[in-house]
Amino acid sequence: MTASTVSEPVLSLRGISKNFGAVQALTEVDLDIHPGEIVALVGDNGAGKSTLVKILAGVFQQSSGTISFDGSPVTLPNPSAALKLGIATVFQDLALCENLDVVANIFLGRELHPLQLDEVAMELRAWTLLNELSARLPSVREPVASLSGGQRQTVAIARSLLMEPRVILLDEPTAALGVAQTAEVLNLIERVAERGLGVVMISHNMEDVRAVADRIVVLRLGRNNGIFAPDASNHELVTAITGADDNAVSRRARRHGQAEAR
């Protein structure tokens, strides 16, 4: 049973449209995110995924449509407003300071006592948060520059949880990671959802999506183009993403599905 069957959405989008001059990036997009649910947002390049996430992060404002949080309409004029409301975002570049250690990165800009840093309290809080996520880091005093890609993603996610958000947005969290690091990050995403947070994950990797997602939401050309269960066939998903039932990618997906069925 998924979270969506037992709870009201913590975050709801209705009729979200966004235009940049004459370019229509999103057209009447609907989306619900429930507590404890992992929603994968997939689509081809230019489908509107990043634009939608940036609207939720307060980077862009929608041209029309409504955003509701806990059932009440809200506005997200800037990233600070989104974070204060309870929406945290981890962008693909992670925005970590490589010359600083893990603790300093987690608390960057949010030091417990700005005039006199409480290093012991910050270190204990960092360890507690990372342990709750079952994160694997050699030390919270390790410089970020010496960490692997998966460990850096861990630090960025831990930092996003510091303000105790209700929803976390992850932009390509497993991009450019190896197999072991990808598994580590996917486990971390599951731990985040187990804390009761709604998770939105943008990804082009369908294996990663199937591994953790409760629902797969497809965007195509800035519009909703289907909501699928993780066990949907590759052919169904590829057709929804590309908009074509007969192309090289969809034919390969169909052959793969037929081979698995034998």
Image (spheres, rainbow, N blue to C red):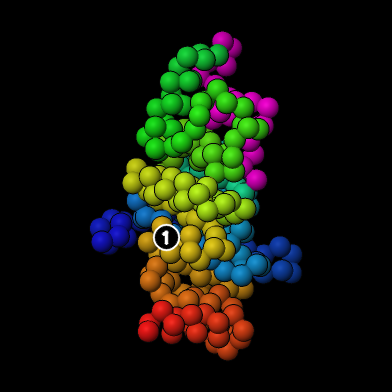
Could you tell me residue 76's position as x and y percent?
55, 47
Q: From the viewer's perspective, is 215 left or right of 75?
A: left
**Quadrant including the C terminus:** bottom left
Instruction: List the single residue furthest toward the right.
Output: 21
Instruction: List the single residue furthest toward the top.
Output: 116
**Main secondary structure found in the magenta portion:** loop
The number of discs equals 1
In terms of depth relative to the viewer, which is nearer, 29 or 124? 124
Rate crowding at label 1 as few (under 14), some (14 to 19) or many (20 or more) other CA atoms within 10 Å. Answer: some
Q: Going 40% across and 64% down the picture, which residue do you hit?
A: 215
Q: Residue 34 is drawn in which quadrant?
A: bottom left
Q: Does dot 1 land on a helix, a strand or a loop?
A: helix
| Amino acid at the residue labelled 1 | Ala
Q: Residue 80 is drawn in which quadrant?
A: top right
Q: Going 58% across and 51% down the picture, which residue do you hit?
A: 177
Residue 69 makes an appearance in the image? no
In terms of depth relative to the viewer, which is nearer, 95 or 55? 95
Could you tell me residue 169's position as x and y percent?
51, 50
**What stretch of residues is rendered in magenta?**
93-116
In terms of depth relative to the viewer, which is nearer, 242 or 101? 101
Q: Which residue was labeled with disc 1?
A: 211
Look at the picture and state if 142 lies above or below 10: above
Q: From the viewer's perspective, is 155 left or right of 6?
A: right
Could you tell me residue 105's position as x and y percent?
58, 29
Q: From the viewer's perspective, is 201 left or right of 109?
A: left
Could you tell me residue 158's position as x and y percent?
48, 36
Look at the picture and state if 163 lies above or below 12: above
